[in-house]
Image (tube, coloured by chain):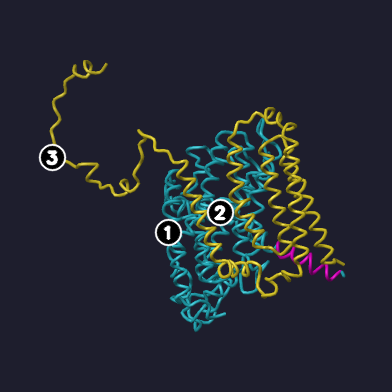
Chain colours: A cyan, B yellow
Amino acid sequence: MGEQILNQLIWPVIYILCIVLPLVITVALYVWWERKVLGWMHVRMGPNKIGPFGLLQAFADVTKLLLKEVILPTSANKALYYMAPLIALVPALAAWAVIPFNDQMVLANVNAGVLYLLAMTSLGVYGIILAGWASNSRYALLGAMRSAAQVISYELAMGLCLVCVLVLAGSLNLTDIVHAQAGTKGIGDWFMWPLLPVFIIYFISGVAETNRAPFDVAEGESEIVAGFHVEYSGSAFALFFLAEYANMILVSFLAPILFMGGWLSPLPASWGFLGHPSILWLFAKVFAFAFLFLWFRASFPRYRYDQIMRLGWKVFIPITIVWVLVAGCMKYFGWVTVGTGG
Amino acid sequence: MIDPQMFQLVCFYAFAAVTVVAALGVITLRNTVHAVLSLVLTFFSTACIWLLAEAEFLAIALIVVYVGAVMVLFLFVVMMLDINQERLREGFIKFLPVGIIVALVMLGEMLALIGVRAMHEAVMGANPATVAGMSNTEWLGHALYTQFLLPFEIAALILTVGVVAAVVLTLRHRTGVRHQQASQQVRVQPASRIRVVKMAAEVPAAPQPEAGKETTP
């Protein structure tokens, strides 16, 4: 009896902790890396005082945030004000349940994995909207409005990108989608080649979905101070921060899994260790995408709000709709080989 | 010892209780934003119940479509409204009989559906997805794109017509509005905006001390 409870209850909790704790630490290191990279791109040093290379800076910041007072604005809606950061964070963490790290390493190998991901990422916007409304502040409300419109618009384009992948892979299971990209041609079998426009649109939509530069009009510090979280301080703000960065890393994980063969190696199998599929390859690809987020932030000025809408509705959605048709033709006429390896 | 069936039953009652309480909250809560949020919770716990019934596609579609998109727009509109809470309360007693009648009719219809389902169990047979050995989502896809292709396409056409109709109904052509033409903005050439004039350097004129004072106000 005890063993059964252990198997059914304790192990899943341990697995969940094995994903969430490294994720939180990765977020801290990612923030440090972001500040370093931005510094180098601005020809500055970045954080370099606390710890070796300033590595402990992020942890010092977290400690500072946790020790600060959470201020409740006058006439804010108390319950929703405190609930909003949690509503933002919970879907951001829950989405990680279906992410496969390896052939075997996945918390929940569900058949409708991609659908589950769509459902979870669509819930995160509630945290932002409620934070904006419950703060009872004009800037916060403006940020929430912008964010809601933007996330809904880009979710459509993102969903259509996923449809293209599903059509080619013939499965909603993320592990099967990676397997469908294995083959004799190695790097040539990845979905990024037949779905190149969709691949690019997917990542740009991911940047827009997470409200990151150059699509960060929801925060837009030069226009509406800090947008939806302008009234938040201390640990409540830290939760929003954690949710945003967890979502960024999630998008960085999904792009390789859906389009670049996940943990598969780009090198031929004769290269020994480097040629074999490995979790390290997945991490290397994820790192590249996570770096792109920072590179975008350092390079591009913020989009104007109406141009964001135009890009989403008039450019991305038509292209992805056409490419759904193209992907269907590829599958039907057998222009691409899918899943010859295991 | 955790009995799986018992656990499922407990889960069902828990989700059902949350659904009922949240649905009551939709019509009783004073704050409209709170009411919309309890509608979200209603949808969410309904999706949980559907997951228990192994209708995973419907459950996740409910969350993606209703919770993720429709209710966000709902919340968006309700947040923007400046509602007088007292006036909203006034009609509650007046409309209560109508509401009760609608609720009773719906209850009757649902009971009838449950009865039909129970009687046709023998005719309809077991869950077709499990018989075919496929997941719920996979079987739904097969059924929609083979057996029910024509109705499916007709439904898609009707929805498209609905979208076009909604756009046409709300589209107003106002005169005197200045639009930006993004394509023209992109295609603009430096030569059409700025002209670089080549000229010889000029020697500055001799200073005239009194001229500045006279011209500046």
* Residue at mark 3 to residue at mark 1: CA–CA distance: 49 Å
Q: Which chain carries label 3?
A: B
Residue A340: image x %, image y %? 52, 80
Residue type, label 1:
Ile
Residue A303: image x %, image y %? 43, 46
**Which residue is farthest bottom?**
A270
Q: Which mark is residue A285?
A: none
Q: Residue A332 magenta-drawn?
A: no
**Label 2's element?**
helix
Name the residue that disc number 2 marks.
Answer: A32
Magenta extent: A2-16
Q: Residue A13 magenta-drawn?
A: yes
Residue type, label 2:
Trp
* Residue at mark 2 to residue at mark 3: CA–CA distance: 53 Å
Residue B61 falls in image quadrant: bottom right
Instruction: Confirm or deny contact between disc 2 and disc 1 (CB under 8 A).
Output: no
Marks 3 and 1 share the same chain: no
Q: How crowded is mark 2: few (under 14 residues within 10 Å), some or many (20 or more)?
A: many
Q: Which of marks 2 and 3 is in front?
A: 3
Name the residue that disc number 1 marks.
Answer: A319
Marks 2 and 1 share the same chain: yes
Q: Residues within 10 Å of mark 1 (few under 14, many from 20)?
A: some
Residue type, label 3:
Met
Instruction: Confirm or deny contact between disc 3 and disc 1 (CB under 8 A).
Output: no
Q: Is residue B84 left or right of residue B119?
A: left
Residue A232: image x %, image y %? 62, 40
**Label 3's element?**
loop
- Which of the pair B84/A92 is nearer the observer? B84
Name the residue that disc number 3 marks.
Answer: B199
